[in-house]
Image (spheres, rainbow, N blue to C red):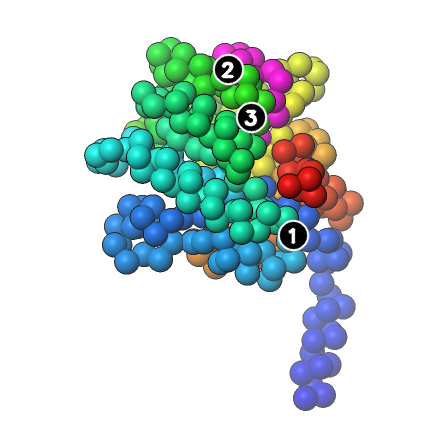
Amino acid sequence: MRFVLCTTLVVLSFLPATQSAPVPVIDSHQHLFSPAAAALVTGNPNAPGINARNLIELLDSAGIQRALVLSMAYTWGKASRAPVANEHEYVKAENDWTALQVAQYPDRLRAFCSFNPLKPYALEELARCSKDPQLHYGLKLHFGNSDVDLDNPNDVEKVKKVFEAANGYHMPIVVHLHTSIDNKRKYGADQARVFLNKLLAAAPDVPVQIAHLAGSGGYDSATDSALGVFTDAIARHDARVKNVWFDATVVVRPAMSPNDLQQIAARIRQIGVERVLYGSDAPASPLVYPKAGWAEFQRLPLATVELLVVATNIPPYMRDFAKR
Ligand SMILES: [Zn+2]
């Protein structure tokens, strides 16, 4: 017993200073899966899904108070999966299931509505969400899953209409900007510029949260060039990025080299730590549970004070919980 205690003290005394950083007040990138969506995504008809109680337990074990839950409804319109009959009905059902789940924890969870923005029902679903007491808080779009091709002007035009409408409803937007890997779409600075010029410009009055530091989890050169478009815009005080936040969800991966960690930290400083949000992503494996995800994020060579800022950032759409 004495030996165990002694060993613990020795280990504690060698922990890096970053271990004393607080836990995030918000997990800004979470998902729930209805049993139906889990069955669709995993191919296992008995997949249990992830409900609000499951998420709350994981948040509690990490000491995180609140989470932004991004509806998975868009996956019913996933471009690289066989189409589902009556797709819009499933999209509505997933958005509504997510709304009912978060409603069980009104002081902890908030949901954003979602759908594939290229689908004919996109504007109708956005209008429906804008009137829903749980779903009107914002919109999540996943350009990769929905195969929004930023090099295709028709796609850009359709998504622009969704951005304009969300702006009109005062609904903030979380966007997974990275284009489809399954469909091998181009992604980098050119595509990020299309987003800045055509889409961000179409939603000037609402906050926009760019997920995964403009990547799709992990960090590679395509992500870095896309992110560079935004850090350049921030450096020149471009009005279009005034309302833009970045979540660093699953950006830091276990096998990452010290060089990659340095580069990510440098980009976070160019963005400004006050605009960077912590997110965990769906708790589909213990590696990305909120507690593990925050431990991973703290491997970045950031000062404790910088980690403190990221941990305590609260984007506008995660405020005012008490009023509900
Ligand atoms: Zn996600």
Q: Which residue is mark 1?
A: 65
The residue shown at (69%, 78%) is 7
Is the residue 196 above or below the residue 138 in the image?
above
Q: Is residue 211 left or right of residue 34?
A: right
Q: Disc 3 marks which amino acid?
A: Met
The answer to if 141 sits in the magenta stretch is no
Query: For the magenta stretch, what is the residue range?
Result: 197-210
Residue 15 visible here? yes
Quadrant where the C terminus sits is top right
Residue 214 visible at all: no
- Examine the image and state in which quarter residue 122 appears: top left
The residue positioned 65% from the left and 58% from the top of the image is: 63
Relative depth, front residue between 201 and 10: 201
Element type at mark 2:
helix
Nearer-N-terminus badge (2/3): 2
Query: In this orientation, which residue lies closer to the viewer: 172 or 324?
Result: 324
Q: Which residue is mark 3?
A: 171
Q: Amino acid at mark 1?
A: Gln
Rendering coords of residue 271 (x, y %): 66, 29
Distance from label 2 to label 1 (Cα)? 32 Å
